Image (cartoon, rainbow, N blue to C red):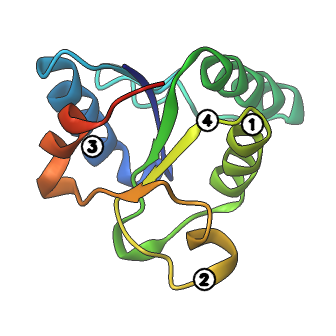
Amino acid sequence: MEIVVGGSMKFRDKIMDVIDELNSMGIVANCPNTSRNDPLDDKTSTKEEKLRLALDHYKAIEKADGVYFVNPGGYMGTSCKIELGYALACKKLIYFSDRTNDIGLDCYVTKFIPLDKLSDFKTIEIS
């Protein structure tokens, strides 16, 4: 299984922890242009840089089986919502760590998997 991990960069540390934990379970997980080593690798100062980062995320979504949104407290910013739409258009499985309490977002979720229950990914079968 391959999962793209998305979320607001204010949750960078949680995102990186999720990637590490999923990878340790044998699940290929990544968040393009984001690393623990360089907290500036996803920072943008121009529209062109923002577009490049977004396109990198979309390419990763195309290759993945699904997308896991790390959204503590239900927070999803604009970029995450656009990634959600792209993942839906690509017919990918959608996972959130938390409910948003917005039916217009939560209705697309394949499964809510809290951050403390990442082992649930091991039980998912890809068809």
- Mark 1 and mark 3 in contact (Cβ < 8 Å)? no
Residue 76 image position (x, y, % from top left): 56, 65
- The kind of residue on which mark 3 rests is Asp
- Please state if 2 lies on the left or on the right of 107 as rendered: left
Q: Which residue is mark 2?
A: 102
Q: Whole-Å distance between the Cαs marked 3 and 1?
A: 22 Å
Q: Quadrant of residue 29?
A: top left
Residue located at (37% from left, 76% from top) = 73
Image quadrant where one finds the N terminus: top left
Position above or below: 11 against 36: below
How packed is label 4: few (under 14 Cα within 10 Å), some, or many (20 or more)?
some
Q: Residue furthest right?
A: 47
- Please state if 112 lies on the left or on the right of 23 as rendered: right
How packed is label 3: few (under 14 Cα within 10 Å), some, or many (20 or more)?
few
Q: Which residue is mark 1?
A: 45
How packed is label 2: few (under 14 Cα within 10 Å), some, or many (20 or more)?
few
> Of label 1 and label 2, which has the lower sequence position?
1
> Of label 4 and label 2, which has the lower sequence position?
4
Residue 64 image position (x, y, % from top left): 54, 20
Report the mark closest to the observer, 1 or 2: 2
- The kind of residue on which mark 1 rests is Ser
